[in-house]
Every structure is written in C-alpha cells, then in structure tokens.
Amino acid sequence: MIHLVDKSTPVVVLRTDLYGPLGVLRSLGRLGIPVYSIGLEPGTPSFYSRYCRGNFSCHVNHGSSSDSVATLLKIGRRIGRKSVLIPTSDQMAIFLDENANALSECFLFPSQPRGLPRALASKKELYYIAKKAGIPTAETTFPASRQEVVQFAKTATFPLMLKGIDTKRLSARAGGWGQGMFVVKNAAELIQKYDALEDPEAPNLMLQEYIPGDDDTVWMFNGYFDEKSDCVLGFTGKKIRQCPIYRGVTSLGICLKNETVDHTTRQFMKAVGYRGILDIGYRYDARDGLYKVLDVNPRIGATFRLFVADNGMDVVRALYLDLTGQPIEHGKQRDGRKWAVEDLDLFSSYCYKRDAKLTVRDWIASFRGVEETAYFALDDPLPFGAMLVNTTRTILRRLSREQGRQRVATNGAALSSHRSRGSGPR
C-alpha cells in the first residue's frame, strides 16, 4: 500500500475526454488527493467520477496560446493553491512545454529540455533522434513530393507502411479515427494512397519499412524519470489485442518483464534528458532480433493502469510523490496482470473473429488475469454508465449517417433510371 505523508497538493488533469485520464482520477483520488478535471465536453465519463473534486469545460489550445494560458491560470487561482498539472495528450504536453514559464505560477510539473516533447511526439524528429542515440528503429523516408514517391517506389521493398508524421492530420484526411497508417502492397497502391492522402502544400506522409509480426510483437514501456533523467519506476508489457486491429491502441494488454525494452528505454531517455512520465512503444523484429522504437508519447499513456506494482505504485503516483517531495516506494512489477478497454476490446474482438484470428474459446480465456478495466469500477460506477450512453449515441449517429447515404444512393439510382426510361423514343 502507498502511504502519503502529505496529500494536500491538488492535481489538475488536462484533457479528460478519454479513459486514460479517468484512471488518473481514480489512482490519485483513492489516496485522498483532490483531483480536478479539464475536458472539452461536459458529458465526458471522467466528469462523473466520484474522485473528481471539480471539473472545468474549456478548449485549451484551441484558441491562441495566450488565451489558453490565461484560462488555465484562472482555473489554478480558483483552486486556491499550486497544483500538479498532468497533460494527457501529446498536444497538451507540447502546450505545457511551450508555456512552462507562465504556467509555473500556478502549477507543478517536470521541467523538460525545451522543445523535447514536440520532437519526441513527431515521428519524423523521433526517427532522427533515435538514430543519433543508437536506438533501433524502422528504416523510414520522408518524401517531399509525388516525384520522390514515384522514384522511391521503383526500388522499394513491399509491403511497406504509409504513415502520417502528424497522425491526426492524416486521420482527418482519411475520413475517420484510427486511419493514421496504412499497409501498402505494391507501387500502384502506394501512388494511389499518396495522391489521395497527401497535402502537397504541407507534406505529412512518411514511408516506413514493414516489420512483420502479430500483435504480440508490440511491446510497451511505462515509466517515470526524475530531474536527473533517471528512471525511478519502470514497467514493460505487450499488447494482446489492438483497436483498430493490427495497428491501433491497446484494447487488451498484459504486464510482462522485458529486460531489453527496459534497458533500451532507460538508455534512450537518459541520452535525450527526458523527465516525467513516459509511454513508449516498440515492435520486435524477428528478422534481426531487435526491438525497434515505434513511437514515444512524452506524457502519461492511456494504458498506464495496466502497469501497477505489487504495492499499488503506478507512474502517476510516482509523479505526485516526486513533485511534492515525498519518497517513492518502488514496488515490483506484477507479471501476468491484464487490463482492458471494454468498448474497444468488444469491437476489436469481433473484428479478429471476423478475420479468423480469434475463437470464442480463446476470447473467453483471454480475460483470465484481467484485474482492471478502463471504465468499470465497483467503487466508481457512473463513468461506465456515461461511456455506455456516449457509445450508444455514437453508434446511432453512424447508423443514421449510413442510412442517409443509402437513401441518397437509392434515390439517385431511381432518378437515373427514370431519366433513362424517359429519354427513349416515343
């Protein structure tokens, strides 16, 4: 059990719209720490948590930085004392780093080397940083024009990965969540995808070697690095299922020790001077026996509650203890612990079964060892209900849009048929 000498310092969670921040509220709230929530929409499940001391709806970083900083400082002054500020997305981590001096008036947070969060969150910058630090990574190229892609395709080895340097930009152009990467099988498909998805005025696509392997080749490291960039708490684990399948976020994961991933991450973050909570992903490449870095999230990861030591310690508790000057009780990693995201895993399981990658028996057996889920908790049931309501609304909206498209297509076909009949000889 974790014992705090002082739990009076409040915590503000920046962007609580998904399930990861809900884990922050519960992890700290169960220790008696006052936790406040900042989200975009009033209906976010985190707002209904019994551990949410207060919530604020505001669009941080959706206007000018000065307006966003002013909004956060206003919230900080309203809380009444200096609070630990925890960003939960890359965008928020970058915002915090770029406005650290102003925000330090009301908030506590690790002091990063300026610009490091933005560099690590960029797949392009990360590639060069990893190469410089001697960390294995998939070979990647960053074409600046269609001509370069055509030339590259002449000698490329397929299949390969087409990804967005900025995943959100690619997802928006591709028409939906989860469309941040594609496996392309030949040169013709590569050119077609590039033409459809690239913005010539602001190139955003990268071409990366395809590393073969199933979901269980994707490993994760979750840790906390102190002001000297020493890892004072670290865990490793791997994905069992993803959503979207084969290339998405963890929907079911397991905690397992991996000395190579652990050592590589500690070496990497020490080399770049990283401080704070880290979530990083690797893929094991059986062709050369290397674990290759996929992405770095310079902030708390949505899966962090998969990684809980035998004494209850996790990375957000380590952050709180460190920033409030209290000793960190490290604890030991608990191999075999599993964690799942209810709605995502239900959908991904259906898709794996559809692809003949999962049987009903294996699906049932896969939940053996699940100790915690993203939304459901006996001591905090309302967020699970809010998730069900939000998911139902999303499904109904998508069905309505699909039915609308079908009606338009049917009416268009009928009109075309009518005109065709009416244009014949009389």
Image (cartoon, rainbow, N blue to C red):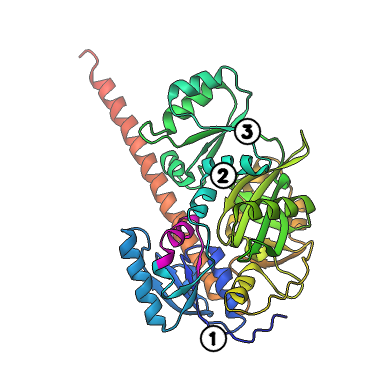
Say which amino acid is labelled 2: Leu
Q: Residues within 10 Å of mark 3 (few under 14, many from 20)?
A: few
Residue 354, given in percent of the width and then of the height, sits at 65, 42
Badge 1 marks a residue whose secondary structure is loop
Residue depicted at x 22% and y 12%: 425
Dot 1 and dot 2 residues touching (CB under 8 Å): no
Q: Is residue 294 above or below residue 278?
A: above
- Which residue position is annotated with label 3? 139
- Asked whether residue 228 is drawn in magenta, I would say no
Q: Give the mark nearer the N terminus: 1 vs 3.
A: 1
- Does residue 284 appear anywhere in the picture? yes
Badge 2 is on which residue? Answer: 126
Magenta highlight on residue 87: yes
Q: Which residue is mark 1?
A: 8
As drawn, is 264 to the left or to the right of 418?
Answer: right
Q: Which x, y percent locates residue 36? A: 47, 76
| In front of the other: 272 or 152 | 272
**Which portion, as a residue range, is magenta?**
85-101
Q: Report the amino acid beneath label 1.
A: Ser
- Looking at the rendered image, the quarter that the C terminus falls into is top left
> Label 3 is placed on what type of residue?
Glu
